[in-house]
Image (spheres, rainbow, N blue to C red):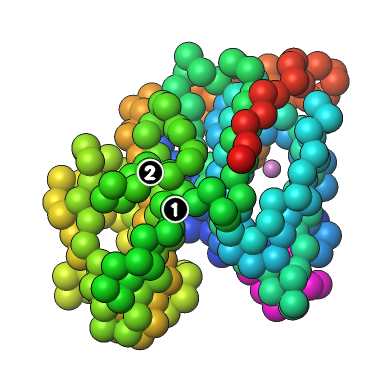
Amino acid sequence: MIEGAGVNVHRTIGTPALRNLDPFIMLDHFGSSDPDQYIAGFPDHPHRGFITLTYILDGHMLHQDSMGNKGDLKAGGIQWMKAASGVIHSEIPQQTKGLMRGFQLWINLPATEKMTDPNYQEFSAAAIPIVEQNDATVRVISGSYGNYKGPIEDPNTNVHYLDVALLPRANFSYELPETMTAFIYPYQGNGKIANTTVPTHTLACLSSDERFEVSATDELRFILVAGRPIGEPIVQYGPFVMSSREEIEQAVNDYHDGTFVRTKARWVSD
Ligand code: CO
């Protein structure tokens, strides 16, 4: 589908087939070797009531918000932006050597956190642990893998986010630390869970209490994401994700009145 000012994305969570997957609201995978498919990016737009988690695989992303924060998220880097009470920002993807690929995941916030102050955590590739094991390479972005811990802290839903690369016929097994919503999404190659093939650009939801194993039919790269469900009503209107219709109306009115952004964000980075 087309988002922003003409950016082609593969969207899985946040479509009519899967409105949300508590605590996840949306998953977009963007990537193209044709700059015309993304170069206009996402000019100024608002977010309220949730977190955006952006992971850049190739290329980089210029971003700037209405509170004066500004940055350039490089390849392998990750940005956790708690929009909470409101952020208006722009995100402009840039290619490096003809490549631009990445993900944006929207994580919901509990009702008590939705109108709190915005907050950023941003880390470069160098801050993300890489675990090499047999024929697997695992980048630990958030949560843990073995004794390794990712730099992003997500206090409300304890999000685990791993980027896994497997050589052909290699296996990867994982056990969730607690009851969580979990999925894998292959973005290169095809995977297999039990006897089911999971093709590229397909979301596979995992049942939470089990240890599961992913095997690579060919060279495989996928993200594994898990988080604690919030279990509250979700009322979404585009970039506003609140708990009631009244709160959505408030967000729309604030945006039109110019009172949307309430406070400057806190910034943590490596
Ligand atoms: Co945005």
In the image, 103: left or right of 166? right
Instruction: Write the residue at 71% across / 59% down.
Output: 60
Instruction: Write the residue at 55% across / 20% down.
Output: 114
Instruction: Write the residue at 64% across / 67% down.
Output: 58
Residue under label 1, please give it: 129
Residue under label 2, please give it: 149
Q: Position of residue 127 (x, y in %)?
A: 54, 48
Occupied quadrant, residue 209: top left
Image quadrant in which the C terminus is located = top right
Note whether residue 70 is visible.
Answer: yes
10 Å crowding of disc 1: few (<14), some (14-19), many (20+): some
Occupied quadrant, residue 198: bottom left
10 Å crowding of disc 2: few (<14), some (14-19), many (20+): some
Q: Quick check: is 33 in the magenta stretch? A: yes
Occupied quadrant, residue 215: bottom left
Instruction: Write the residue at 74% across / 77% down.
Output: 97
Height in image: 166 above or below 10? below
Q: Quick check: is 160 in the magenta stretch? A: no
Q: CA distance from mark 1 to mark 2?
A: 7 Å
Identify the amino acid type marked 2.
Lys
Image quadrant in which the N terminus is located = bottom right
Q: Looking at the image, tell me whether mark 1 or mark 2 is earlier in sequence order.
A: 1
Q: Position of residue 111 (x, y in %)?
A: 47, 18
Note whether residue 202 is visible.
Answer: no
